[in-house]
Image (cartoon, coloured by chain):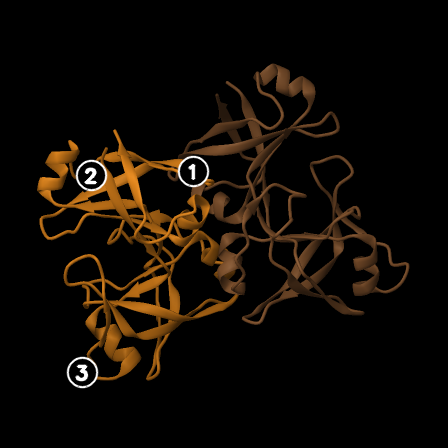
Chain colours: A orange, B brown
């Protein structure tokens, strides 16, 4: 049995340095609110508002550290509320995606792309991958038990030696499967 | 191949006669906004607000006709927004479930139970059941293709000769699987 812990991602945003400064002021540094399961990653104290012509969502958590690309990750539920046609994408793959307005305490800005619904995926090290018999970029299936039991197909394997073993799903997927962060699921090949 | 059309249920409410009158006035009759796939069922023109101590959701559609029990069906996403611990239940099985405040244009009331997250299920006739080789009350699995492809286990079969063939899932399940009303899915046994 190959068990993997679940991490449920609520909507969040990654920012590049110049965007942190546009939203929070010149030279601003994000403060760590909580360490995340992936080494070096953290939920920042700071949040922003994301806005479209249809509506807005406040208190969207920034995840640090600074990245080279600004990327907004929402759920499909959020995409309907906001009226934005966000595609399912793996992190970093944001070409051709819709933009949005981002509002901070010291400024606001429009990004012309970067809004995605994250593709479900499993982070693991090279050793984990060898133990599980999978490789980076492979799609696998994962079984969830319980009263909302299901099998997620189309789960992307992402391998890097700095990763911690963790399956990331969004709130829609967690709610549909009756999962919470810290639950464990079984890898099927 | 055994294909079944999907019906996505947004949050909604079923009301008994005395509750319609408490919310809309004595002798009030619901107006048909749209016929639903199940014969005789309709989305009413009327909506209500549901409220807890934590928050409220406006524009919750009433589904008619009148029922013998008042029942509020929300998603798990809604249950977090409202702060109500709604269990996964099949329709009508509401004993021991949480209550909520329901607000209409002419009155408001507290129900002390009736809030559920609907258990995913497939409506079918006796003839459909025979053709599929399933029986009322059985749990089956259903396969969804596409970029959020998955297999829903724990899908309840509900057989009645007045039913139309339809698999009912909620918005979390639809969003997790990349499904919309009218899509078709495959029954697995």
**Which of B145/B125 is in front?**
B125
Q: As drawn, which residue projects farthest toward the front?
A: B96
Q: Please state, as top left, top right, bottom left or bottom right, where the N terminus of chain A lies in the image.
A: top left
Marks 2 and 3 belong to one chain: yes
Marks 2 and 1 belong to one chain: yes
Q: Is residue A100 visible?
A: yes
Residue name at image x 44 percent, y 52 percent: A76
Residue name at image x 50 percent, y 27 percent: B140
Q: Which one is closest to the eye, mark 1 or mark 3? A: 1
Which label number is shown at residue A149? 1
Which label number is shown at residue A71? none
Give the mark nearer the N terminus: 1 vs 3.
Answer: 3
Q: Considering the numbered disc 2 on the image, is that residue within a helix, a strand or a loop?
A: loop
- Asked if the residue at tag 3 contacts the one at tag 2, i.e. Cβ–Cβ closer than 8 Å, the answer is no
Q: Considering the numbered disc 1 on the image, is that residue within a helix, a strand or a loop?
A: loop
Disc 1 from disc 3: Cα separation: 48 Å
Q: Residue A6: x, y in percent?
A: 30, 49
Q: Please state, as top left, top right, bottom left or bottom right, where the C terminus of chain A lies in the image.
A: top left
Image quadrant assignment for residue B98: bottom right
Q: Is residue B103 left or right of residue B89?
A: right
Give the mark nearer the N terminus: 2 vs 1.
Answer: 2
Q: Residue A126: x, y in percent?
A: 9, 42
- Per the image, the residue denoted by label 2 is A137
Q: Is residue B30 visible?
A: no
Chain to which the residue tagged by mark 3 belongs: A
């Amino acid at each position: 049995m190959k068990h993997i812990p679940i991490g449920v991602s609520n909507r969040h945003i990654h920012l590049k340095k110049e965007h942190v400064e546009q939203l929070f002021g010149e030279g601003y540094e994000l403060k760590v609110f909580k360490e995340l399961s992936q080494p070096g990653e953290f939920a920042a104290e700071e949040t922003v508002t994301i806005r479209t012509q249809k509506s807005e969502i406040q208190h969207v958590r920034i995840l640090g550290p600074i990245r080279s690309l600004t990327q907004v990750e929402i759920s499909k539920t959020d995409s309907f509320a906001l009226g934005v046609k966000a595609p399912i994408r793996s992190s970093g793959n944001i070409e051709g995606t819709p933009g949005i307005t981002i509002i901070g305490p010291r400024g606001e800005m429009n990004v012309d792309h970067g809004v995605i619904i994250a593709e479900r995926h499993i982070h693991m090290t090279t050793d984990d991958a060898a133990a599980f018999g999978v490789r980076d970029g492979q799609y696998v299936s994962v079984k969830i038990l319980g009263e909302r039991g299901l099998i997620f197909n189309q789960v992307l394997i992402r391998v890097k030696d700095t990763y911690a073993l963790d399956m990331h799903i969004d709130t829609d997927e967690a709610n549909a499967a009756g999962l919470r962060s810290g639950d464990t699921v079984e890898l099927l090949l």
